[in-house]
Image: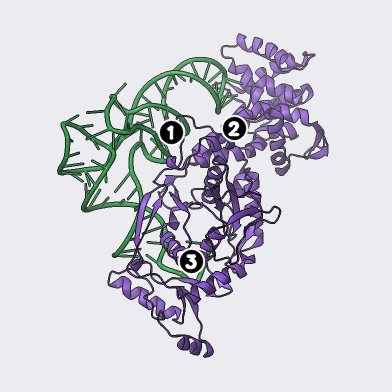
Chain colours: A purple, B green
Amino acid sequence: MTNDSEKIITRFAPSPTGPAHIGSIRTALFNYLLSKKLGGSFILRIEDTDKERSKVEWEHMLIRSLKWLGFSWDEGPIIVEGQESIFDRTNYSIRYIGNKGPYRQSERTEIYKKYLQKLLDEGHAYYCFCTKEEIEAQKNYLMSIGESPVYKGTCRNLTKEEVVERIEQGKKCVIRFKTPESQKISFEDLIKGKITFDTETLGDFVIAKDLETPLYNFTCIVDDFEMAVTHVLRGEEHISNTPKQIAMLNALGAKHPFYAHMPLILGQEKKKLSKRDAETSLDEYYKDGYLPEAIINFVAFLGWNPGTEKEIYSMKELIADFSIEKIQKSGAVFNPEKLDWINGLYIRKKPIAELTDLCLPFLIGSKLIEPYTETSFRTTDTQQIITKNRIEKAVLLYQERMKKLSEISEFIDFLFKNEINYEKSLLKWKEMTDEEIISSLKISIGLISHIEEFEKSEIEKVIFAEAEKMPNRGNILWPFRVALSGKQSSAGPAEIAELLGKEKCLDRLELAIKKITYA
RNA sequence: GGCCCUAUCGUCUAACGGUUAGGACACCAGAUUUUCAAUCUGACAAUCAGGGUUCGAUUCCCUGUAGGGUCACCA
């Protein structure tokens, strides 16, 4: 329990209408960083007032992504206590109750209803009976004469009797906020500076379909107030919602939180991020083998920088160095190449045992191996048992080559497969003739068949000694390496030879000879 | 169209009014390699335009231009 009303409280308020994406993660991250930096709380609020589009599945997916990336939030509602009326906000303290979160707006209808009723009772909101068609026509007209297309308040001054009469006639209605006329609403945006709006450009906007069905702008301010949110960090697309929210908060007699509107994340064309620019779902990044720490690091630098040349940051370091002042004012183009670079960097930094564990699901997923015991696997192709230890060795060879975990399968599939497919021409190094390749392979067979201790250092010694005798080392090394891996590029010849084992190496070298002879 | 926001290398960005405008990714070249990667070295590359203010402007002001956001009974 805490009574510190000075405490920073931020929130991440996604609507469960789709998976988490890069943009939503950055919003979550910056709110998280700010609260952690200042020792405050971070709230997760699910904005599921739109019953049609919201799905619990999306909510679960959102939470899964957040957890994967290492977020934690202060669960459970903050109770406003010590008050007779929830509308009395002059003196309140907050208390945290665990294990009840996250907040779900769909479960808070009664709360919104009270505030809605209050607005209605005090004349700050009214019932509107205009049809959608009427609104649309008005909007088009206003745009045609060069004015802000807003609701002009046809139903604004309906008397109580008129309202009752229309309701009794069964006319459909919504609840609109009575926006103050000819007023300037300003707020000090923590990123953009002072922003001013004229209420004339706002119009009387809809805040609820009915008492039980409040809409976004309204539930948002009620919750931010009820949860004592102090700082709202959100995307720039919300700038135009801000004066509306402040006007409602004013009507409720509440102070508004600090706002910070972050620039948008843009696609290659400097347009809104689309499928062509980035994965729509964070799940895709998981499936591609991106590391959560790489994503966090990358996303943090989309519109923020520490002002130094340091750019590799763990979550902990981000918390330490984060500051709103350093958030950029202009939009940032999402750059997948840099993400890949950072991901590769984190992969190289991973302890090998940990990296192997991360790669295993990808190997299993691409049907190369299947789990056998705790410490071993069975190759799908040949049903042979392969120890985790040996897989670890393979992963180690490719650690510095990987940009994404998913690439591991293509890199080391030759270790698990019985037969490897490659073009015969791949065996040829530079200008070698078929005869030279065959002779090269035969030399290799002769050399390695005599090696007792089939280890990298030993194989290297023998093979390289022979290669030195050639006009070009590649004459021995290239056909040898290709015969074993079947690939244009791979780890070193001795390394993969050790990995494969003597017997398999000999088999593959013979096979390579046959490939040329009988092609 | 109204309102609002923004403007430094291709991209992410640094530069309390005074710097040869710095760094990173990408790209290119070199070193190292049998290959690929990693690593190291180097090269290329930017202050949107026009006016002010100032001894001096990337930085402050204005105008223009361009881009973006928003104008839902979505969030």
Up-down: is A313 above or below A230?
A: above
Residue at 50%, 87% in the rendered image: A164
Q: Nearer the viewer, residue A370 or B7?
A: B7
Left or right relative to A66: residue A26? left
For numbered disc 1, what is the local secondary structure?
loop
Spot occupied by residue A13 in the image (x, y as percentages of width and height): 56, 56
- Name the mark on residue A307: 1
Mark 3 — on which chain does it sit?
Answer: A
Q: Are marks 2 and 1 on the same chain?
A: yes
Residue bearing the label numbered 3: A252
Q: Nearer the viewer, mark 2 or mark 1?
A: 1
Residue at 70%, 17% in the rendered image: A444
Report the quarter where the C terminus of chain A lies.
top right
Q: Are marks 1 and 3 in contact (CB under 8 Å)?
A: no
Q: Nearer the viewer, mark 3 or mark 2?
A: 3
- Name the mark on residue A388: none
Q: Are marks 2 and 1 in contact (CB under 8 Å)?
A: no
Which one is earlier in the sequence, the residue at label 2 or at label 1? 1
For numbered disc 3, what is the local secondary structure?
helix
Spot occupied by residue A142 in the image (x, y as percentages of width and height): 32, 73
Spatial distance from mark 3 to mark 2, Cα to Cα? 49 Å
Specify the amino acid type for callout 3.
Answer: Leu
Up-down: is A31 above or below A495?
A: below
Q: Are marks 1 and 3 on the same chain?
A: yes
Specify the amino acid type for callout 2.
Answer: Tyr
Q: Nearer the viewer, residue A184 or A379?
A: A184
Q: Quadrant of residue A463?
A: top right
